[in-house]
Amino acid sequence: MMEHIPLNFPFLAAALLAGVAFYIIIFKRNLIKLIMGIALLASAVNLFLVALGYRAGGNAPIYTDVPEGLMVLPVPQALTLTSIVINVAVLALMLTMVVHIYRHTGDIDAKESRRLKG
Amino acid sequence: MDSLITHSPALIVALPLVAAFAIPLISRAGPRVRNTFSLVIFGLITFLVAILAMDVHSVGIHVYTFGATAAELALPGGYTVPVRIMFEVDGMSIFMGLIITIVTLAALIYSLHFLKGQTGQARFYSLMMLLYAGMMGLAFTGDMFNLFVFLEIASIAGAGLAAYRTNMADAVEGGFKYIVISAVSALLVLFAIGILYAQYNVLSIAALGYYMQYTTLDMMALGLLGGAFLMKLAAVPLHMWAPDIYTVAPAGITPMIYTSSAAAMYALYRVTFTLYGSAIDTTTIGWVVIILGVLSMFVGVMMAVHQTDIKRMMAYHAISQEGYMLLGVGVGLAVLADPGALASYGRDAISGGIFHIINNALYKGMLFLTAEAIFFRIGTRDLNRMGGLGHRMKWTAGFFIIGALAISGIPPFNGFASKLLIYESVLRFNPILSVIAMFVSLVTLASFTKVFYSAFTGPEMPAYKEVKEVPKSMIIGMAILAACIIFFGIFPGLVVNTIVAPATDALINQASYINAVMGAVP
């Protein structure tokens, strides 16, 4: 049991990050903090994906210059890269919207942005 | 011609992507050139969708592998699992593709006049093309990771469009809510994809369905995927965001955002039927879907009755109508494992639920467009300040009547055709559910009668003496949808046989989707 802990550690960290992120997304009212919560959730998922791709003692899959032994499948890394790029776009869009909300209401607290309800 | 059909799945997604980035450049040559360019490109895409639909109808599942020596070659020699990115277009995918294309075409034509004189139009059309590309990709993709990518493309473009009128505080707020909901649900999807990949080392939906063991981890992944898609399609109790977005988004965009919810519903069905399919306990999952459907139906319509904002009211009706689709497909899912019940009423229930998706996209889309036509002319969405508009806006009033009768399930409009299928089949499964569905339909009719009465009838109000009918392109946009509504209502059998039945069979027949890719596996 004990020898699995170092390998499982990244997954535990990802779960912890996701938990903190959900706490922030659900309970924080400051819109900037909300965005930080989503960024944390994205990091948790990225950490999870990268941890999946780790193989102890594996080599980078560069066919022209590869030492003897296991080669790592590069798919999880490719997924993570794509996901990072997409999340940058999402976060940038969210921040611009918060700037617009601030211009209209003079506040970035979610309880001020309550025009839409019912 | 043959190679055009072969490559059409890729072109249908690639063309709008290229167009989206070309439009800002082209619009430097003037708005007329840009509008013509958008229309020509979209006409071309519509043509491609039409020939692909005919091909799928006559030949069957269309697999397109990117980068392979032949587009149909899903498994290169020596491989037992697909390694390339691929699109897989079956009856259900092309069915969604047709819905998305019809709604986008109407929205594009409607927007041509609606946007006149506003700033940032080039970016509006860019985002519209991106949203279209995202939704089509979602419908066509054959692997889980691209499902996530296209979901995000559609979300980003949709949020940008919802917040297009940044001079209005509520529009930005609505857009922000949409992107938060979309970002969280997309990350949940990615998390689930990670779990699936960790176990099976493949991302292709067909290969995952082939290897599916339904372990505890798969159960978690199903929960994450289901929760994420239900959030995106705004089923009760995750519906709170939808009325806000539908209310503030500009005309033309509201139907498109509604359609992207339908695309999320497609993803939900794809995951439950094709990815998990026979591996799961379909009766339990089916009942979960049924309960969510009944809740959405009932809560949606009850919230709609007392709204005074015309678009907000329609938004709650949209949630209520989604309940019907979930109910129909849920009943089919619940009896999926029982061939006798499936043949006698389960298949009809799924057909009804799927047929309702396209009917609802048509009449709901048109109702949103009429609401925006009123807003365009009188500058308010408040029902209490409207009245007597029928004297001046005859076309809009006419389209509103067609939409209102269709949504309430009155013959001879299309809502009747799909609701009848749902009532009949659900009655044989559980009569109480059918009674609830009919009751909701009655309340819907009552609610729309109230709106028609307060907005269009009565004496002409002095404040609206100068109100004119909306410009031609807006009428044409609404007329395209109205024509489809009437056509679908008069010839429901034709529509069910040509596009709905292949979609139903595509969902039920999990093996054919898997074999189209994995067929070479011994």
Image (spheres, grey):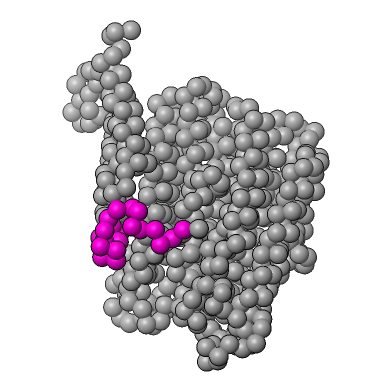
- Asked whether B522 or B17 is in front, the reply is B17
- Asked whether B349 or B515 is in front, the reply is B349
Q: Which residues are magenta?
A: A97-117
Residue B197: image x %, image y %? 41, 30
Question: Which residue: 27% across, 55% down?
Answer: A108
Residue B144: image x %, image y %? 45, 39
- Asked whether B189 or B234 is in front, the reply is B234
Question: Which residue: 52% across, 92% down?
Answer: B466
Residue B465: image x %, image y %? 55, 91
**In the image, residue B255 lies in the stretch drawn in magenta:** no
- Asked whether B503 or B402 is in front, the reply is B402
| Number of numbered tags placed on the structure image | 0
Residue B314: image x %, image y %? 58, 63
Question: Which residue: 66% across, 67% down?
Answer: B448
Up-down: is B71 above or below B461?
A: above
The reply to whether residue B385 is in sight is yes
Question: Which residue: 61% across, 77% down?
Answer: B455
The reply to whether residue B68 is in sight is no
Q: Quadrant of the C terminus of chain B?
A: top right
